[in-house]
Image (cartoon, rainbow, N blue to C red):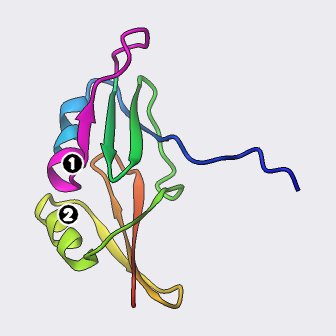
Amino acid sequence: TYKMITGLDHIQISIPAGRVPDALTFYVDVLGFTRVPKPAELSQAGAWLTVAGLNIHLGERANFNTDGDAHPAFCVSDLNALLARIETAQCRIRHDDGPTGYIRASAWDPFGNRLEFMQRLV
């Protein structure tokens, strides 16, 4: 079969308008992303972030809402250490079951967006 999809460029995560500083505190300071410049020809609202070849675009929305369930899942090397950082930031976490071969948990950013974190067990 012909495969047209060749990879993943970025994940878009919506945040409330005017809350980029709060988002950067969580995504950069807690999760370890690095902010990168947006191309000059694009709106400078929001922020672009990267870590380990993974790109996130934070998009500001005047009428922001989230269902708190739709989520990206990130592979991590030390789930417990990351969860400790998230707890220190006073964000909600939940330990999740399976799948077999993984430990996993969910956390919610300061705006209610769910993020899943998965650590593969050897």
Q: Position of residue 57 (x, y in %)?
A: 41, 35
Q: Quadrant of residue 80?
A: bottom left
Q: Nearest the camera: 76 or 82?
A: 76
- Above or below, 51 against 12 in this view is below
Q: Amino acid at mark 1?
A: Phe
- Residue 119 part of the magenta segment: no
Q: Main secondary structure of the magenta part?
A: loop
In the displayed structure, 60 sits above or below 72; it is above
How many other residues sit within 10 Å of disc 1, few (<14), some (14-19) or many (≥20)?
some
Q: Earlier in the sequence, mark 1 or mark 2?
A: 1
Instruction: State which region is magenta.
Output: 27-45
Residue in the picture at 11% in, 64% down: 88
**Badge 2: how crowded within 10 Å, few (<14), some, or many (20+)?**
many
Q: Residue at x 49, y 56 (%)?
A: 71
Q: Residue 107, how many percent across, how many down?
A: 33, 64
Residue extending farthest top: 41
Q: Which residue is mark 2?
A: 86
Observer-nearest residue: 14 or 103? Answer: 103
Question: How many marks are shown on the rendered structure?
Answer: 2
The answer to if 38 sits in the magenta stretch is yes
* Residue that badge 1 annotates: 26
